[in-house]
Image: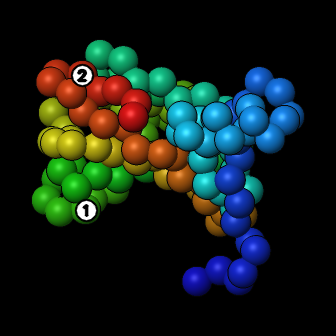
Amino acid sequence: MGKSGSAWIRVKAPVLTAEAILRAIRRGAFHATTGPRILSLEARRGRISLHTSPASRVHLISEGVGSGKTRLAATPQGSTRWSFDIMKERLNVTRFARVEVLDRSGRTAWSNPVFVRGRGVRFW
């Protein structure tokens, strides 16, 4: 367990005003972190792709991957680009998944959930 104040949220807002930041938070345009950054996260046609600050590993976490709450490592495309092909890998993501980013210092970032709808995935 980390010490108090060692994690925060990074909000993607168009301007630095209280209204814009609160709107972004309500939309889910933020992620929790102890250091690493999730610069972009896209979910399209059964694929989850993300761009991060330099990372050593990225995991997909879901109640439906394998049996129980399992972590699956992403396909690295460099140390800042990662992807999961849910359809190709036949992953059993039944309701939602989260992405966890780990850097070389052991710090972590966590995405908001990506929800499954039919044969694809979508953001909340």
Left or right: 87 as drawn, with respect to 73: left
| Position in image of residue 64 (x %, y %) | 18, 50
| Position in image of residue 14 (x %, y %) | 77, 24
Q: Residue furthest front?
A: 19
Taking depth in this image into account, of 105 and 114 the one nearest to the observer is 114
Which residue is rendered at x = 33% and y = 45% of the image?
97
Taking depth in this image into account, of 44 and 19 the one nearest to the observer is 19
Which residue is rendered at x = 70% and y = 66% of the image?
7
Q: Residue furthest top?
A: 45
Figure disc tally: 2
Please tell me whether mark 2 or mark 1 is closer to you in this view: 2
Q: Secondary structure at mark 2?
A: strand
Name which residue type carries label 1.
Lys
According to the picture, the residue beneath numbered tag 2 turns out to be 120
Sequence-wise first label, 2 or 1: 1
On residue 69, the disc is 1
Q: Secondary structure at mark 1?
A: loop
Q: Quadrant of residue 51?
A: top right
Which residue is rendered at x = 29% and y = 27% of the image?
121
